[in-house]
Image (tube, grey):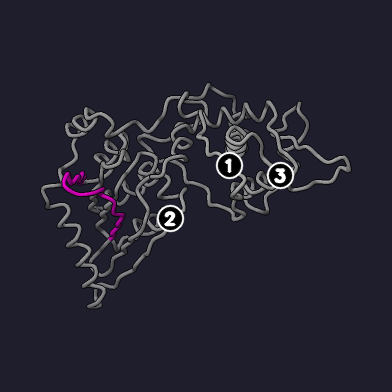
Amino acid sequence: MYEILEQALADDKLSEFTAVVAWAKESGLSRIRTMLQAFRARGGATRIILGIDEGGASIEGLRAAITDFGEALVLHDRAAGTFHPKVYMISGVESSVIVIGSSNLTRGGLVANYEAGVCLQLDLEQDTDKQFHAEVAQYVQRLSGDATSRPLTEDLVQQLIAIPGLVSAEAKPPSAAGKPKSHGGLAALFGLSQHPKKQAPASGPVAPSKPVGHGGAPHLDAATVARVERFGEAAYRHKKIIDQHGSITRAESLAIRRQIYGTGSAAQRTVTLFGGEGGNSIMRMDHQEDGRTRNGDLVHLTEEGKRIAGLWHAAHQADAAEADDPA
């Protein structure tokens, strides 16, 4: 979804962008903020209709929607179920791009989760395409013009915050964010994906994710910053599985490293990450008596690995917290 928006919002033939989503969060909006600013700077109109149901809304996301979009609406139907659509429409005079799928405007929905959707590139000079575009536009207009929809303002945000349990902050306290969720025996039932995953894009301006050395992390020298950025996510994800399930195998470790670094990078191999307990190694691995490496060998984080994992987590706390967020 991120790549579709990146391409469509950069197309100077498209001048209107509407997003209809169940939830929008700072973790997602920050990643398309620069695109939105450029789109609006050249005269593009932007509108968002978002929901607040099921505890999926965040304070930061509501406020970001106000500043990032020219028009922001919040929808809640007290007589019906959850407001749950995900529709994106970027349109111009001659063409439009419409996406209907499962992606919310959150980090998970844009880049991190397993999502599915249909992206339609419409030629508005063709009758069938023009008709379909009109039907989606009418659906959006019906939502925005109904009594269930209200303009999103700071005053409304304050009113929503005052309702217990409705909206919450994205950045969880260290005591909560640092405590992994337990999933019982799932590790014994499911493996880790062998397919490489694309890296999440960095946050944009105004309210970016905290870089290493700011916010939740102490000030670090440049060498440590580079080390945390290179190895921190791998160390943190290893630590999370070890904390949850007590151990992690070489096969599971390799799957994580391939997801982060790909299959051809030296960084995912033993040369740069593994070593003994001392020194700068991030991990160490138990071997059989014959010295051969097997998929079932256990991998351990060294003290240095734990330190790097902690620093990475402190610097990316909101993102790490949302890894457990179904939105």
Q: Which residue is mark 3?
A: 250
Q: Is residue 281 left or right of residue 224?
A: right
If the image is split into quadrants, where does the N terminus sit?
A: bottom left
Cα distance, mark 1 to mark 3? 18 Å
239 lies above or below 215: below
Q: Which of marks 1 and 2 precedes in the sequence?
A: 2
Q: Amino acid at mark 1?
A: Gly
Which structural element holds mark 1? loop
Q: Is residue 125 left or right of residue 321?
A: left
Q: Are marks 1 and 3 in contact (CB under 8 Å)?
A: no
How far across and down, in percent of the image, does residue 127 sit?
22, 78
The part of the image, by quadrant, that contains residue 246 is top right
Q: Which residue is mark 1?
A: 185
Seen as rendered, the residue at the extreme right is: 290
How far across and down, in percent of the image, does residue 33 sit?
35, 44
Q: What number of labels is visible?
A: 3
Segment colored magenta? 71-90
**Depth check, front residue: 297 or 65:** 297
Does the rendering let one see residue 194?
yes
Q: Residue at x 28, y 68 (%)?
A: 95
Q: Which of marks 2 and 3 precedes in the sequence?
A: 2
How far across and down, in percent of the image, does residue 270 sit?
74, 43
Q: Amino acid at mark 3?
A: Arg
Label 1: how many Cα within 10 Å (few below 14, some 14–19, many 20+): few
Q: Amino acid at mark 2?
A: Glu
Label 3: how many Cα within 10 Å (few below 14, some 14–19, many 20+): some
Q: Which residue is mark 2?
A: 115
